Amino acid sequence: MRDLVDPSADQGAVAPSCRITSADGSESDYMFDEDEVQVVAVKEIADGDELSQRSTESSESVADDRAQWGGKLEFLLTCIGYAVGLGNVWRFPYLCYKNGGGAFLIPYTIMLGLVGLPLFYMEVALGQYASLGPISIWRINPLFKGLGYAMVIVSWLIGLYYNVIIAHVLFYLCASFTSELPWTTCDNEWNTPYCRVYDYVKESSKGNISLFNSTLSNLTDSNMTLSSNITNVHHSLITTPSEEYYNHRVLGKSSGLDDIGTVQPYLALTLLAAWVIVYLTLLKGIQSLGKVVYFTAIFPYLMLIVLMFRGVTLPGAADGIIYYLKPDFNKLMEPRVWSDACTQIFYSLSACSGGLIAMSSYNKFKNNCYRDAVIVCVINCGTSVFAGFVIFSILGFMANEKNVPVSEVADGGPGLAFIVYPEALSRLPIAPMWAVLFFIMMATLGFGSEFSIVECVLSALTDVFPQIQPRRANIIFRSVFSVVSFLLGLPMVCKGGIYLLNLVDFSVGGFPLLVIGMFELVAISWIYGYNRFSDNIFAMLGKKPTKYWEICWKFVSLLVIAITVFMNIIMYAEPDLDGQTYSEWAKSLGWMISVFPITVIPFWFLLKYCHDGGWKLLSEGVKPLKSWGPSEANKKFEYRDNGVTYKSDRSAFARLMSSNMSNITTNTTLSDFPFSSSNTLNNRDVV
């Protein structure tokens, strides 16, 4: 092994030299001629860094070889697109009204300050300082490298089902290019006899609705025939056209995960289109991603503003906004509200999934990552609140049209994006235009996050395996990855695929991220040490973090996450979809998906520990010490240990009295005593 000696230590007067260590451990110096070598750079390598690790991760060891963003705005927009996604539109508003309306903003803001922002800032600073991906970054603590693998696994799983949701959006987008939206009537081939269309005419008494005038043709059920004049159907069986369009036309929804069914061909095509878009966008890595985010990060805000102005001008919009923000402070006494706020912060900011480390690793060393972290977090949470106004203004209009409370039309998740909102859009003038704009917004929100999620996985694996770093090899790797991911997503576009998608989302979106965040805080703030990390930030920004960050990183954030994990375990609710529970094998599958990334952390810890001498240390640690044996008082007897016979070490007094002692013991041997060790060893079968 050769270590380059920096000649600058002697004012440049000494020629560069190389210290050569031979196999027998001897060292010798070799002096180069001035024209033989030119010292370009000297990089200090941390102690304990193995040669094998240096060779496998050599590409990112020199910051100059790593690509960088084309400008500061590219990184900022990428982080905004990564953090602001579909969850801001369909998850946060629903959680807000369910957990106390405006009162939910209190725990949400507190969790942002105590957990979300500290973790976001930590990960951005960590990636920028080392210019390494989420796996290679754990040179900072090799035993915790399993955290990096866990982050990448979580990102990969999220990327798989996230693109399936985008495939649903693309399906709706294509279906919106028509003169009449297909989810407005009940006379389509996918409709059932229970489909009814609201006529939206209010009754004068008690706010009842003059329900459903349907244009159903004669439809034949397996057991009965219903005609269009049949109206005596129990209200629990009635479905809307948008419901049936999503469940029967788009999903071809089966009875459960046990009945997975065949692949829906149109969804398979839109899923393929989604992965082709992702592949082409990320073909050149961050060089191409940095240009695309100018559209994917900005366009959704334009659409939200347009939909906001349209929504607040509709009748009943005020009722929806009031319902959205009306505070119920009694909810703050429920632990579930605080747990939901903390979990939503992780989900919304995309913390602890490796993407923030990967994106910030392409920053310049002196970039103001503190400013970027605050800006992105504030914009992300502000977008969530703003999207709530947009969504609930439309829901208030819909409730006003149906003359029902807002609670009866409010929903979260896919139900909001693909059932409730499309139905509301169908009531607007020039409905197809608004539907196209809405689903373009949803697609850009989804792709903005998906691009960063997938690039996190690709860049992390590229950092670890230098064989795929050359341009040609990297293109092949990205192609194969996209094809494999598309194939793994196909089960989620089967007739029972929505149940699998919901199960993966339920299993990955909360618990694993919380556990990863907890271990990450321990590894950085306590094992690596806050003081070291503070010095690293000082090297980049020229100033150390304030006391607030130290308290959060070392104590508060860690405590809050630990309590949230405990609360999620105590208040665990089994996954379900539209009130339908999963079978036992499906629940077990969900637990395996949830635990899989977490188990990588201790697995790597033990593997690394044993490989680097821990096994030898363990084997030595279980061996008896040299001092093991009978006590000093009992060493007057002969005893055996590990095949060696030890005899009495008689004292000086015994040697002086040897003549008398020999007279006493002339006819007696040590083996005659029943309590003798040698007698016991040599006669184990004698009682």
Image (cartoon, helix red, strand yellow):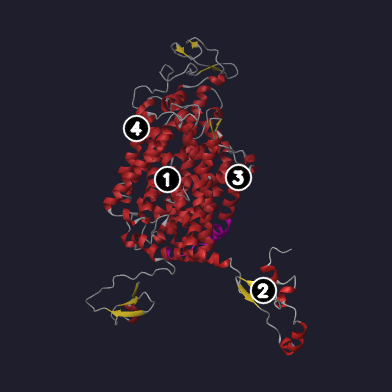
Which residues are the magenta region? 541-556
The residue tagged with tag 2: helix, strand or loop? strand
- Label 3 sits on what residue type? Ile
Label 2 environment density (alpha carbons within 10 Å; few <14, some 14–19, many ≥20): many
- Residue 659 place in picture, x, y as percent: 74, 89
**Residue drawn 49% across and 41% down?**
385
Earlier-in-chain disc, 4 versus 2 = 4
In the image, residue 549 lies in the stretch drawn in magenta: yes
The residue tagged with tag 1: helix, strand or loop? helix
- Residue 589 place in picture, x, y as percent: 51, 39
Counting labels gives 4
User: Disc number at residue 269?
Assistant: 4
**Residue drawn 52% across and 34% down?**
321
Earlier-in-chain disc, 4 versus 3 = 4
- Residue 208 place in picture, x, y as percent: 57, 18
Taking the view exactly as shown, the residue that stands out farthest to the bottom is 656
In the image shown, does 31 or 155 lie closer to the viewer?
Answer: 31
**Residue drawn 58% across and 58% down?**
555
Task: Give the spatial CA distance, label 1 vs label 3.
Answer: 24 Å
In the image shown, does 130 or 681 lie closer to the viewer?
Answer: 681
Q: Mark 3 sits on what residue? A: 569
Earlier-in-chain disc, 4 versus 1 = 1
Visible residue check, residue 113: no
Is residue 633 depicted above or below 465 in this figure? below
Earlier-in-chain disc, 2 versus 3 = 3
Taking the view exactly as shown, the residue that stands out farthest to the left is 35
Q: Mark 1 sits on what residue? A: 156
Label 3 environment density (alpha carbons within 10 Å; few <14, some 14–19, many ≥20): few
Q: Quadrant of the C terminus?
A: bottom right
- Residue 215 place in picture, x, y as percent: 44, 13
Earlier-in-chain disc, 2 versus 1 = 1
